[in-house]
Image (cartoon, grey):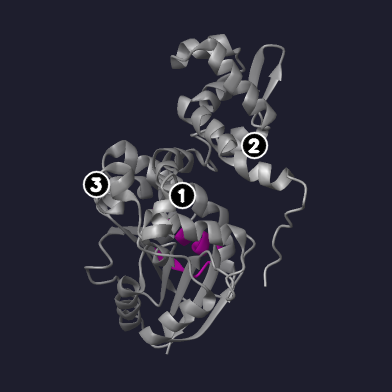
Amino acid sequence: MTTQPTVATDPGAILDYIEAFRRSKAMFTAVRLGVFDRLESKPQPADALASQIEANPAALDRLMAACVALGLLACDGELYRNTPAASRYLVSTSPDSFAGYIVYSDESLFHLWAHLEDAVREGSNRWAQAFGSRDALFDYYYRDPQATANFVRAMNGFGVLSSDRIVRAFDLSRFTHLVDLGGATGHLAIAACRAYPNLRATVVDLPRVEPFAREYIAQSPVSDRVNFVTGDFFAEPLPPGDLYALGRILHDWDDAKTCPLLAKIAAALPSRGGLLLAEALVDDDRSGPVYSLMQDLNMLVCTDGRERTLGEYRRLLEAAGFSSVDGKRTGSLVDAVFAIKA
């Protein structure tokens, strides 16, 4: 059982939960206005920056003062500058940037979560309610080049946090060819090839992802061992490999959608082939961790899927033809599950 945060009888924790969204929205707004990108070039006073981003000087100064209090900016006299954390994670050109995920969270997740009450009452996602359409989830995220760029960069920013831990959670040294289905920018495939010198990898994703993926792969130190191919892994044959990976894919779908995919992967694998999953595991008694349970609610408002326990993944995998299912916490936002074709 996960140890849960203790909510004392004083109101501190409750007040923190009440106002938590304000801190998020302040950071989201500063990112979307380009505050951190502009300040990365040089420290500036609020009035000078306001003229560049078409903002009200007094209001921008209030926002930037709030960012100082949050530890995202520092202020020397009238000059604001980025803190090291902002330079690393909030500047869009940083290799570790979360800016894409922040824009995605602000323009999509923030609106969907506003209807959590209705999602709980009805047990369904909130796309039609928030955006007036039942368009498929990924059609929305890939609706135009800018939205595609934001979403792909969002997934990359979160992916690089945990990919190295995922591929090292189990000994994968006996495998020779990893096929990363829905691998986006290839962050997991790149991490795997860096960890295992005898491994090569193929990343499979949709054509609209290809230019972004090729850019990230080309910049990696293992670009000669990572290839990208376009494809819809639900509808098309899978490239051959002795190890497949699904990184934050299964949580988007219900069991009716995931079971055929897992069976398809099992059929494509050779005997003793492996499947590596990267997902946020919920404790078997569903008592935690907090992040996984919050992500489970995120899946409720966003998708037809959910975050699962290791026991639930074990049942799905064994029904699809896998055995020796094991899971490991990584200490990051995403955990690792590994199975062998029976």
Q: Which residue is at the front of the view, 77 or 211?
A: 77
40 lies above or below 303 = above
- Mark 3 burial class by Cα count in 10 Å: few <14, some 14-19, many 20+: few
Q: Amino acid at mark 1?
A: Asn
Q: Which mark is residue 39?
A: none
In front: 8, or 83? 8
Note whether residue 187 is visible.
Answer: no
Q: Tag on residue 156?
A: 1
Within 10 Å of the Cα at label 1, are there few (<14), some (14-19), or many (20+) other Cα atoms?
many
Q: Is residue 21 magenta?
A: no
* Relative horizontal placement of residue 231, taking residue 105 as reference (left or right): left
Distance (Cα) linking label 3 and label 1: 27 Å
Q: Does residue 194 belong to the magenta stretch?
A: yes
Quadrant where the C terminus sits is bottom left
Give the amino acid type for the residue marked by disc 3 in the picture. Answer: Ser
In the rendered image, the vertical position of residue 75 relative to residue 112, given as above or below:
above
Nearer the N terminus, badge 3 or badge 1?
3
Give how far apart the Cα atoms at labels 1 and 2 are: 18 Å
Q: Which residues are magenta?
A: 184-201
Mark 3 element type: loop
| Most foreground residue, 96 or 116 | 116
Q: Quadrant of residue 294?
A: bottom right
Residue 301 seen in this snapshot: yes
Disc 3 designates what residue? 133
